[in-house]
Image (cartoon, rainbow, N blue to C red):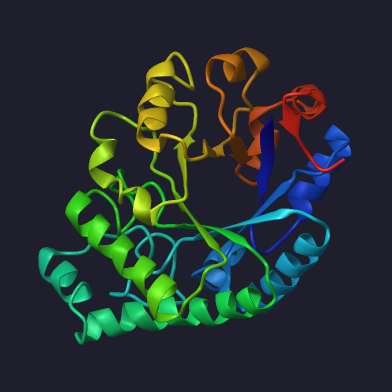
């Protein structure tokens, strides 16, 4: 059985999941959201919506849905709120990376302040016994986000936040989801290890220079890394077909916000929700 998931941007919260439910006849079982980083400059990820986000997480949990929380953290060199380009999509110098990964430095303290602010919210949900699939620092094998493109730096960063939440704060309601971009050869260099990862997934979108959206070799490479851990399509636009899922038995897939409507017809959405292979909210 495959879990159907849907991501929703902060400024419209559950609008996409609700619209998908009307078309497909069922609500996605997994509700995806974002912690945010911006202000009116990138309003879909406005940190002003965070109290609303927590209330929506509670509402979705009461409705019996699984919560998946992504986080595009602002670069500590910029701080939040920030713009997407130049704030999340930016690069750190070697000197800045060294400072960020050194406890006690100004840059590390700025990173830690944002991490601990999210920890306050996660501790509230922890106290309320709400489990969260936590999805930080995705697409780290690409070079478009500040945390990406440098395996050793990324691994150190992942273990820093993992240790902070797991051991310092004792937050144990998180399932840590590691989600690279298209898993080309070499993606293994970014894998933090099975002790610091609970779920694996890969973000895959169609590209003009590729004949197929979901090459079998990508699934096989990710499955080899996942072992017996759950593994899915953590971001996508083009819905998988029955034939694809027979060859590539993912455990879940998450459509990214309104891209589900841009990449698929309403009939394709209905077919997915009517498939006996896929579990949605009845």
Q: Position of residue 270 (x, y in %)?
A: 81, 27
The image shows residue 241 at horizontal and vertical percentages of: 65, 18
Q: Please tell me how many numbered marks the rendered image carries.
A: 0
Residue sitting at 49 percent across and 70 percent down?
37
Left or right: where 129 falls relative to 103: right
x and y percentages locating residue 182 in the rendered image: 39, 33
Q: Is residue 256 left or right of residue 265?
A: left
Q: Quadrant of residue 243?
A: top right
Give the left or right position of residue 206, taking residue 32 as reference.
left
Residue shown at 47%/40% (left/top)? 229
220 on left or right of 230 = left
Residue 100 against residue 252 in the figure, above or below: below
The image shows residue 246, relative to residue 141, as above or below, that is above
Q: Position of residue 99 (x, y in %)?
A: 16, 76
Q: Quadrant of residue 109?
A: bottom left
- For the C terminus, the image quarter is top right
Q: Which of the 4 image quarters holds residue 110?
A: bottom left
Residue at 47%, 77% in the rendered image: 170
Quarter holding the N terminus?
Answer: top right
Residue shown at the point (33%, 75%) measured from the top left: 78
């Amino acid at each position: 059985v495959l879990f159907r998931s849907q991501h929703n941007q902060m400024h419209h919260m559950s609008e996409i999941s609700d619209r998908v439910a009307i078309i497909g006849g069922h609500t996605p079982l997994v509700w995806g959201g974002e912690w945010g980083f911006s202000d009116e400059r990138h309003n879909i990820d406005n940190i002003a919506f965070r109290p609303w986000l927590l209330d929506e997480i509670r509402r979705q949990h009461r409705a019996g849905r699984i919560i998946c929380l992504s986080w595009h953290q602002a670069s500590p060199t910029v701080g939040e709120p920030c713009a997407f380009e130049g704030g999340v999509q930016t690069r750190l110098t070697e000197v800045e990376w060294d400072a960020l990964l050194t406890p006690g430095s100004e840059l590390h303290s700025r990173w830690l302040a944002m991490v601990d602010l999210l920890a306050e919210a996660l501790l509230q949900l922890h106290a309320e016994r709400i489990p969260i699939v936590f999805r930080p620092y995705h697409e780290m094998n690409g070079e478009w986000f500040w945390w990406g493109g440098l395996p050793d730096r990324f691994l150190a960063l992942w273990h820093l936040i993992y240790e902070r939440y797991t051991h310092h704060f004792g937050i144990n309601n998180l399932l840590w989801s590691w989600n690279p971009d298209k898993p080309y050869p070499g993606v293994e260099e970014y894998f933090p290890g099975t002790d610091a990862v609970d779920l694996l997934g890969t973000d895959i979108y169609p590209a003009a220079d590729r004949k197929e959206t979901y090459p079998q070799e990508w699934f096989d490479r990710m499955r080899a890394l996942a072992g017996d851990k759950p593994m899915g399509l953590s971001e996508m636009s083009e819905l998988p077909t029955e034939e694809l899922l027979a060859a590539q038995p993912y455990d879940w897939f998450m459509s990214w916000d309104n891209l589900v409507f841009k990449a698929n017809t309403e009939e394709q959405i209905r077919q997915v929700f009517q498939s006996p292979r896929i579990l949605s909210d009845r």
